[in-house]
Amino acid sequence: MSQGAKPELVSEPAPNELRDPFVRQELKRATIWLGLAGAIALAVLLVQPLLIIFGGLVFASMLDGGVRLLRRVLPIGRPWRLLIVVVLTVAFIVGVMYLTGAGITEQVQQLRSTLMTQATKLMDWASRIGIMPGKADLNGIAQQALGSFGKLTSYLGIAFGALASLVMVLVIGLFIAMEPRLYESGLQWLIPRDQRARFAGTIEQMATTMRRLLAGRLFGMALEGVMTGIALALAGVPMALVLGIITGILAFVPNIGAITSGVLMVAVGFSAGMHTGFWAIAIYVFIQTLDGYVVIPMVARRTVDLPPALTLSMQILAGTLFGVLGLTLADPLTAMIKVALERSSEAEGEDEAAVKA
């Protein structure tokens, strides 16, 4: 370089300058991946509150279905119709408990005693064939387990947590059912204006699908509970009333509910004799077969047609990740995802058709 000559300057931007297209592109990619990772981490941390909120939406859909059904016969304001639905629901529950309270209480106590007796017999049999510890060892293990204050405290904490979650689901659902349009408008406000019409259509389709799904689920629960109670009573199985009610309630929980009610049914049946026990097994197999091959497909065709493999996979995944609450809400969540994907596919098809036109 000669003396007095100006030095040559590099014209390309430095790597740390945002003017470089390559830097901007890589920064955009990194931001997307970091945002996605943050969203996943936040969802994992908030999964329990999110499930409670979704449970509230499910309960609100139940109430909304009753309100819409009542509108056909009572042309009054929505708050009054909602109040009537809530009052009728509470009155029905209280009435059933009052009319059958004494019998149910006696049968529940008898059921508890029967299950303890059957469990003791099962453990004695297992001890005799050598697959479980002896009776003395079992008594010592039982006393040690019952005397563990830490486990008792843990169980009480789980029970209170489940009760608090249930209360929150009911409260959230009631508030949403009172003013659904208010919350829908709030969600639309978060969406860009040119996308609000499409978003409103998706929300409406989701709400309709949810109402149909839950109506079918409630119908199946009632039918399964009534058929089970009547069949057990005709077969002479003790505590047919309480077993029918338990079967109907547990039918809302996929897979686990049917297994639990079946175990209770068979245990009570064998407590009354070998013949009654086999009748209980036959009734359980018949009810579950009828429910799986007749009732559920019939309800699915009239409500929401979910592929069985997809439903079962979602139930396993949700139950493994989120426990009983996730398993209970697996079907509604699957239905909502299905509606969202279908609406997104329809929107893409409409956009492509508009571009070609």
Image (spheres, rainbow, N blue to C red):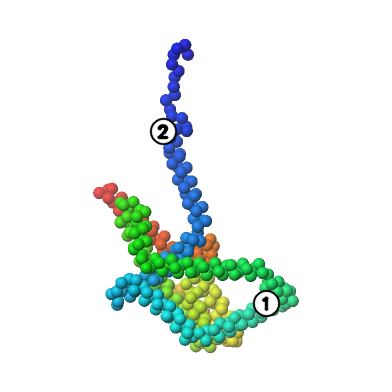
Which amino acid type is marked by label 1? Answer: Met
Where is residue 251 shown, x and y percent of the image? Answer: 48, 74
Quarter-wise, where is residue 175 in the image? bottom left
Judging from the image, what secondary structure is the residue with disc 1 in?
A: helix
Residue found at x 51% / y 68%: 164
Q: Which residue is drawn at 47% across and 85% down?
A: 98
Gap between marks 1 and 2, in whole Å?
75 Å
User: Residue sitting at 43 percent across and 16 percent down?
Assistant: 6
Amino acid type, label 2: Arg
Residue 193 position, x and y percent, is 31, 52
The residue that disc 2 covers is: 19
Q: Mark 1 points at which residue?
A: 123
Residue nearer the viewer, 344 or 182: 182
Badge 2 marks a residue whose secondary structure is: loop
Decide which of 290, 188 is in the foreground and name it.
188
The x, y position of residue 296, in whole percent, is 43, 72
Q: Taking 354 as reference, is 213 left or right? A: right
> Reading the chain from its start, which is encountered first: label 1 or label 2?
2
Residue occupying image coordinates x 45% and y 69%: 170
Query: Would residue 299 be seen by someone viewing this image from the given angle?
Result: no
